[in-house]
Amino acid sequence: MDDYLTRYLSSLAGSWAAFAEAHAGARLLRGDGYLALLDPEHPVLTNVAVLAPRAVPEALGLLRGHTTWAVWSWDPATAEVLADQGLRRDVTTRPMLARLDDVDPPQAQPPAVARDADPGRVAELNGADPELLRGVPGLRAYLTADGESGLVLLPRDGDVNVSMVATRPRSRGRGLAGSLVKAALHDMRGEGYETATLQSTPQAVRLYARLGFAPLAVWQEWVG
C-alpha cells in the first residue's frame, strides 16, 4: 500500500480512537481487513472501513442492532461482495493528503481566527449535535471570528486530521473555509507536523487541491 495511503489510514484510526474515548458506549474495533467505529449515541460516527473482500462478513456482523451506519470500500472486489450482500451505493468521499512544507502561507490579511474555539459551535455549523465534538481528546476547534466558518483538527503522530469544515450558507463564496484551513495548517506546520489528511466531498476536491491536497483514493459508502 502507498505510504501516504497508509499514513491516511493511521490518522483516520487515531481520530476514530479519540471519538471512541470521548463517547460512552462507543467502540473502536480493528480486524483482519477492516476498521470500525461504533457509536449508538451518535449514529453519524458508526462507520466501518472494509479494506479487503474477506472482511465483509465480519464487518457486517458488527452492525447488527445499529439502525444508521455506513460501510466504506475503495476497491472493486470489495464493492462486488457488498453489492452481493444487498447493500446499495450512497455517497463517495475522497481521502486527500497535503505535505505541510508545500502548503502556501496564509494571505497577508487573513480573516481573524479563533484558534481555541468551542467545538460545539463547529458541530452546529455542520448541523450536528454540539456534544459530538466536545470532550474528544486532542481535538482543536477553529472558527472565523464572526463564527461563519469552522473546522476541527485531530493531530496524530506527525499528521493532522482535518474534518467538519463548514461555512454558513449566507457566507459561502467569500473564501472563508479556504483561509481557515490554510491558517490551521500553517499553525500545525509551525508545531512540527509533516502532513495533513482529510476526506473531501466531490464538490470540495478543487478547493482542497488549491490548498495543496492531493487525492489518494475514492471511498464508496454503502448503506443497507
Image (tube, rainbow, N blue to C red):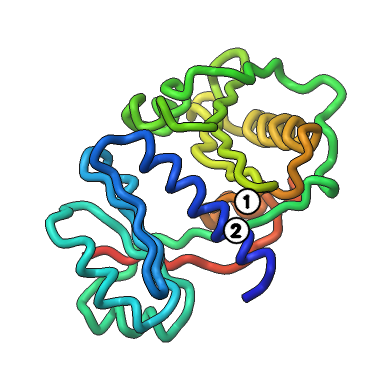
Which numbered disc covers residue 28?
none
**Residue drawn at the location 70% of the way across and 59% of the way down:** 214
Residue 31 position, x and y percent, is 37, 69
**Residue 141 location (% of width, % of height):** 55, 26
Above/below status of 65 relative to 170: below
Q: Which residue is at 54% across, 32% downward?
A: 138
How many dots with numbers?
Answer: 2
The local secondary structure at tag 2 comes to helix
Q: For the point 63% across and 16% down, which residue is it?
A: 114
Where is residue 12 drawn, in percent x and y?
51, 53
Instruction: Residue under label 2, please give it.
Output: 8
Q: Tell me the amino acid under the disc marked 2.
A: Tyr
**Does the CB distance between marks 1 and 2 fall below 8 Å?**
yes
Left or right: 94 with respect to 28? right
| Front in this rendered view, residue 152 or 192 | 192
Q: Which residue is mark 1?
A: 197
Q: Could you say which quadrant of the image residue 104 lies in?
A: top right
| Quarter of the figure with the N terminus | bottom right
Q: Is residue 164 above or below residue 51?
A: above
User: Which quadrant does the C terminus fall into?
Assistant: bottom left
In the rendered structure, which disc, 1 or 2, sits on the residue that comes first in sequence?
2
Say if 182 sits above or below 66 in the image. above
Identity, as a three-letter code, of the amino acid under mark 1: Thr
> For the residue labelled by badge 1, is the local secondary structure a helix, a strand or a loop?
strand
Left or right for 38, reference 151: left
